[in-house]
Image: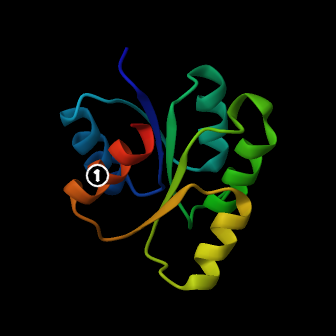
């Protein structure tokens, strides 16, 4: 069974790049435009992993992580933050919310695949 990855970003170009990269590696991808959309999609299609941006309208990445972690069904799903923020306080905030890891934009497709394979096994 192929693994399903939910990618959440308000930037269409980032979503396209992430989706293209993941599909080339055989993953199934569900796209969401913000945290609110992501929660709705997660209810419809439970994913094996979430890749989320930090800065988004309606619900940011930290709020999304807290919401996902508060649902017993998704408590242990790996969540990776994709963001331009590299400050340690933001990383700490992400970790405290329940993020599994962090990728700083811009990133190379190989970097993304490396993290996904490491986390999903």
**Residue at point 28%, 48% (across, down):** 113
Residue ID at (53%, 85%): 87
Viewer-proximal residue, 67 or 33? 67
Q: Position of residue 38 (x, y in %)?
A: 59, 40
Please determine whether, in this image, residue 98 is positioned above or below residue 102: above
Give the position of the N terminus as an image quadrant. Answer: top left
Q: Position of residue 105 (x, y in %)?
A: 36, 70
Q: Residue at x 49, y 78 (%)?
A: 85
Q: Could you say whether the residue bearing mark 1 is in a helix, strand or loop?
A: helix
User: In this figure, which colouring scheme has been used for the structure?
Assistant: rainbow
Q: Is residue 112 above or below residue 72?
A: below
Q: Which residue is mark 1?
A: 114
Quadrant where the image shows the C terminus: top left
Q: Nearer the viewer, residue 23 or 12?
A: 23
Residue drawn at (74%, 45%) of the image: 69
Q: Position of residue 117 (x, y in %)?
A: 33, 43
Q: Is residue 21 shown left or right of residue 47?
A: left
Q: Is 83 placed above or below 89 here?
A: above
């Amino acid at each position: 069974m192929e693994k399903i990855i939910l990618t959440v970003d308000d930037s269409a170009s980032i979503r396209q790049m992430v989706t293209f990269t993941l599909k080339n590696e055989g993953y199934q991808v569900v796209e969401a435009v913000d945290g609110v959309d992501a929660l709705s999609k997660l209810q419809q299609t439970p994913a094996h992993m979430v890749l989320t941006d930090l800065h988004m309208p309606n619900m940011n990445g930290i709020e999304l992580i807290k919401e996902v972690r508060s649902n017993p069904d998704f408590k242990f799903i790996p969540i990776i933050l994709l963001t331009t923020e590299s400050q340690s306080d933001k990383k700490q905030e992400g970790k405290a919310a329940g993020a599994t890891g962090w990728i700083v934009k811009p990133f190379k497709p190989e970097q993304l695949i490396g993290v996904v394979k490491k986390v999903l096994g």
